[in-house]
Amino acid sequence: MLLKGKSLIVTGGSRGIGRAIAVQAARHGADVLIAYRHESDAGYQRGDAAREVLAEIRTLGRRALALEGNVADPDYASALVEYAVQSFGRVDALASNAGVCPFHSFLDLPPQLLRDTVDINLNGAFFVTQAVARQMQRQGQGGAIVATSSISALVGDAMQTHYTPTKAGVHSLMQSCAIALGPYGIRCNSVLPGAIATDLNRQHLSDADQRSHLEKRIPLGRLGQPDDVGDCVVFLASDMARYVTGAALLVDGGMFVNLQ
Ligand SMILES: NC(=O)C1=CN([C@@H]2O[C@H](COP(=O)(O)OP(=O)(O)OC[C@H]3O[C@@H](n4cnc5c(N)ncnc54)[C@H](OP(=O)(O)O)[C@@H]3O)[C@@H](O)[C@H]2O)C=CC1
Ligand SMILES: C[C@H](O)[C@@H]1OC(=O)[C@H](O)[C@@H]1O
């Protein structure tokens, strides 16, 4: 078990990649607090998605908690840490994963959509990382922070002009935090998923031509699944990656290098 006895906060842990991170971490022995917001257009009743994750983790014999809120609110970031410390006694790792990606064309993109996307994806990652790092510094035993950036940190997309800069920012945040937090033994790394089949892009990938175009660009021949990313996050959060900090791990089936 790679995370035996550890306590982990996973933002965006109710669905998709975050759910996979939370469950895989529990399989490796961690207790987990998931942060979620309740996205009504994902087709769940309020809290149902989170409750499903908690139930799955508890069947694995681990403790599981959830706290609804918005990572863009720094007070919620602090509340997450306080809840984890009250319940688990400490915070050993953070998966800063929550994010949104409403596809939209550039020329008519409304200012509020840009502000909301930056607020959640980048500012939210900053606030949660800062709150958890403060707790880890108080604990004095180091820790591991893994942010979910994206292949979109490295390449663009015409319908994601408000989104790709946030993913580049998340990766850059981890690089700077790796330097700032290294003296406290806190490691900071990013995973950069490619095209992963989740609610985030369900509509986008429901277009057969779009899906086929993507699959043809992926040397492994398939879209990623959330567990493909979850297992990589568990590795980076574990002592197996004890000398890894400031790194970026592409989890894309080879899509990024397949240009010619
Ligand atoms: N899917 C993909 O192809 C890729 C995804 N990524 C990144 O992976 C991460 C997860 O994406 P994915 O699993 O696909 O997305 P999903 O839409 O499937 O899940 C998003 C999760 O984030 C939560 N969330 C959204 N906004 C907030 C908020 N303001 N505060 C707290 N929680 C919030 C949602 O909570 P709730 O359920 O309550 O709505 C949900 O748990 C994102 O950062 C995304 O940018 C990166 C590359 C590729
Ligand atoms: C939601 C998109 O399909 C997905 O999100 C990312 O970050 C990747 O670049 C993909 O575009």
Image (tube, rainbow, N blue to C red):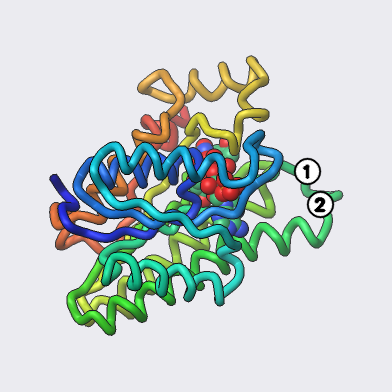
Relative to 57, say whether 173 is above or below. Answer: below
The CA distance from mark 2 to mark 1 is: 6 Å
Q: Seen in the image, is 106 located left or right of residue 118? A: right
Quarter where residue 238 is shown: bottom left
Which residue is at the front of the view, 36 or 220? Answer: 36
Q: State whether residue 101 is above or below residue 11.
A: above
Q: Which mark is residue 17?
A: none
Count of numbered circles on the image: 2
- Reading the image, the residue beneath label 2 is 109
Which amino acid is tagged 1?
Ser
The residue that disc 1 covers is 105
Depth check, front residue: 212 or 196 = 196
Quadrant occupied by the N terminus:
top left
Q: Give the percent coordinates (x, y) of residue 34.
A: 43, 54
Expressed as whole percent of the image width and height from the top left, the position of residue 203 reads 67, 28
Relative to residue 64, is residue 234 drawn left or right? left
Q: Secondary structure at mark 1?
A: loop
